[in-house]
Amino acid sequence: MTARKTAPAIDSRQPLGRHLRRYWQLYAMLLVPVVYFILFKYVPMFGNILAFRRYRPAMGPYGTDWVGFRYFQKFMSDASFWSAFRNTLTLSLLNLAVNFPIPIVFAIMLNELKAIRFKKLVQTVSYMPRFISTVVVIAIISELLSPSSGLLNRFLQDVFNLPPIYFMNEPQYFRLLYVLTDTWQYTGWTAIIYLAAITGISNDLFEAATIDGATRLQQIRYVTIPSILPTIMVMFILNVGRLLSLGFEKVLLMYTPSNSGVSDIIDTLVYRTGLANQNYSYATAIGLFSGVIGVVLVAGSNFFSRKTTGESIY
């Protein structure tokens, strides 16, 4: 019997080295966002230790004494925290209920347009507000709703003879203004994701539906929406995870003493407690609690999505 020849050993590092040499430009471009996330997302996580330690100025950045869950117990019995928590949850759920389905509907309607030039014009105009600074957006809204020179108040006064209304100062208008400005600023930008998913649908599905006699609405219901359902569920999970992380800058710019009863959210409470009052440990505990709730919401929505639709992030 002849001896069986053994295959030469394969250097497993060679394919990886060849791969890196071939695509080194892509990995070099990836280096910048990786460094950004490490420096500004992961490294600051070590600061959460302040939630369990007492911070004293000029005595180290990570506190001096271990206090356990003292600060957690403190904000659990704080009425201002629960007011901020309630305001955050109410505003987030309202924003999710309004601004989550609108980009989906807008993307489907935009996809149905046959005039290519008009479609591109609408798409460009719709996502341009995303590049406007939040400060500028609130400044525009303030000018439009000004009680003295705002266009809306002039219209109400000339047509309906109503007295001027200070919309930015009245608590009953705060949530409406927050949601509508988000709708104007982010609908077109978010719709790009759904448009990309729609363009990835095979034309054979639409042709088969047309042969079967399906109308355009039936094609949207039975072809378009089921095909982009994975994208919808991923976006839904991500939005649920951000329920307690509203736009801090916008809320702070819209915040006034008169509407503080509805505009004071967790982020503004952390800002006021940590930076204004310099109670860093207490503010860190509130922020850590909000982050933990966000993780729970992401895990819960991911589990719900996997059980009901079979789609999930992980």
Image (spheres, helix red, strand yellow):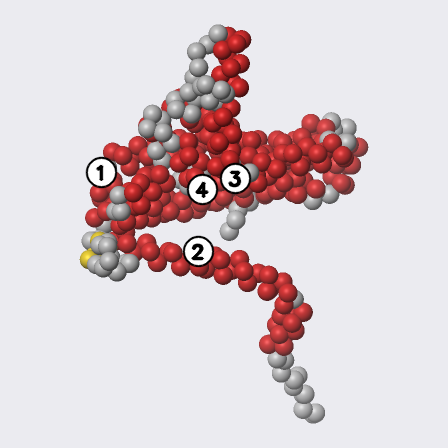
Tell me which corner region of the image, top left, top right, bottom left or bottom right, holds residue 53.
bottom left
> Of residues 2 and 57, which is closer to you in this image?
57
Q: For the residues carrying marks 3 and 1, which lies nearer the camera in this image?
A: 3
- Residue 282: x and y in percent read 26, 46
Three-letter amino acid code of the residue under disc 2: Phe
Q: What element does badge 2 sit on?
A: helix
> Residue 25's x, y, as percent?
64, 65
Distance, label 1 to label 2, CA atoms, is 32 Å
Foreground: 181 or 155? Answer: 155
Amino acid at dot 1: Ser
* Disc on the earlier residue, 3 or 1: 1
The residue carrying mark 3 is 133
Q: Residue furthest right?
A: 211
> Disc 2 vs disc 3: Cβ atoms closer than 8 Å?
no
Q: Position of residue 86 (x, y in %)?
A: 34, 32
Left of 144 or right of it: where is 193?
right
Q: Amino acid at mark 3?
A: Ser
- Of badges 2 and 3, the one in the foreground is 3
Residue picked out by circle 2: 40
Q: Quick one: label 2 or label 4, which is nearer the N terminus? A: 2
Comes first in the chain, label 2 or label 3: 2
Residue of label 4: 242
**Is disc 4 placed on a helix, strand or loop?**
loop
CB under 8 Å between callouts 3 and 1? no
- Against 5, is 152 above or below? above
- Which residue in the protein does label 1 denote? 77
The residue drawn where x is 62% and y is 83% is: 9
Task: Please give left or right for residue 289 compared with residue 221 in the image.
Answer: left
For the residues labelled 2 and 3, the Cα–Cα distance comes to: 21 Å
- Amino acid type of the residue tagged 4 in the rendering: Arg
- Sequence-earlier tag: 1 or 4: 1
